[in-house]
Structures are given as C-alpha cells and as structure tokens.
Amino acid sequence: MKLLLNIIWVVFGGLVLCLGYLLAGVVACVTIVGIPFGLAAFRIGWFALWPFGRTVVDHPAAGAASAVGNVLWVIFFGWWLALGHIVTAVAQAVTIVGIPLALGNLKLVPVSLFPLGKRIVRVGGGYSSFGPDLMGPGRSSTGENLHLN
C-alpha cells in the first residue's frame, strides 16, 4: 500500500515538491551561512519525494544551534512552506482519492516548520537511506550509536 501511495504521490505533486525543495537547497548552499538551511531543504525534499512509510523524529544530538536555526527558518521560510502544505492538503482532501495525499501533505508541515535537528526514519525502524546525512546512519556527532527502536 505504501508503494502505491508513494507512486500516486510522486505523479500528483511529489516530484514537483522535491524539485522545489532541492532547488531551494542549492540556492541556500551558495552562501556559507546558508549551508545548514540548504541541507535541511535537501532533507525535506527527499522526504517530500517519498513520504509514505517514513516519518520525522528528533535527532538526539541536536542542540542550541538547531533551535536558533529553526527560529530563523520559521521567520524566513517555514511559515509559508507550512501554509502551502496546509492549503494543498485542504484542496486534496476534497476528493476521496486525495485524502491519503492530503495526509501526506500534513505530514510535511512539522518538518517544513522546524527542519533542523530532525531525522527521517522508516516507520518500521532504522534510518532511512534517502537524503543527505553527514554523520552517517546511526551515528551522532559525539560518536555513540543511536537507536530509535
């Protein structure tokens, strides 16, 4: 079922969402200051491409820098991204076929508001193989292994 929902999602807007987030990530990475925001946009983009079967969790190694970055993100980008996902979800929920897609869009709202200090994981456990992860799967910046199960 997840595969079917993801294929329908990609056809009816997921690919466009992914490309938009990836383009925003490239633009943000042009400046050194924007690199963390660019990486966050890449992470959201990969999640927006294939959202069913994956979820967003807090990264245990996230600290104060993520909180400050999230405040800046909400002020400049997050509120309109979240609003766009909500409006799109309402439009998709008008049809019965669109209800699961609307739920997928609503799933993107929290990560579009606060993307820093988050990880995308499979619903069944374990880290996702999608998206950039600079520390590698299952590792934190301090070197200890992370277990989310």
Image: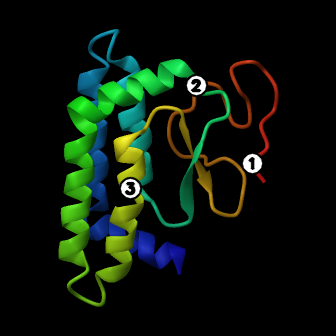
Q: Please tell me which residue is depicted at 34% across the width and 73% down the height of the picture.
A: 101
Left or right of residue 122: residue 75: left
Counting from the top left corner in percent of width and height, residue 39 is at: 42, 28
Compute the Cα span from label 2 to label 3: 22 Å
Judging from the image, the colouring scheme is rainbow
Callout 2: SS = loop
In-front residue for pair 147/71: 71
Q: Please tell me which residue is depicted at 29% across the width and 90% down the height of the picture.
A: 96
Compute the Cα span from label 3 to label 1: 20 Å
Give neighbour class at mark 2: few <14, some 14-19, many 20+ (Cα, 10 Å).
few
Compute the Cα span from label 2 to label 1: 18 Å
Q: Please tell me which residue is depicted at 27% across the width and 46% down the height of the picture.
A: 19
- Judge whether 148 appears above or below 115 on screen: below
Callout 1: SS = loop
**Residue type marked 3:** Leu
Q: Which residue is mark 3?
A: 108
In-front residue for pair 45/11: 45
Callout 3: SS = loop
| Residue 87 shows in the view | yes
Q: Which mark is residue 134?
A: 2
- Judge whether 142 appears above or below 113 on screen: above
Counting from the top left corner in percent of width and height, residue 128 is at: 61, 49
Q: Which residue is mark 1?
A: 148
**Residue type marked 2:** Leu
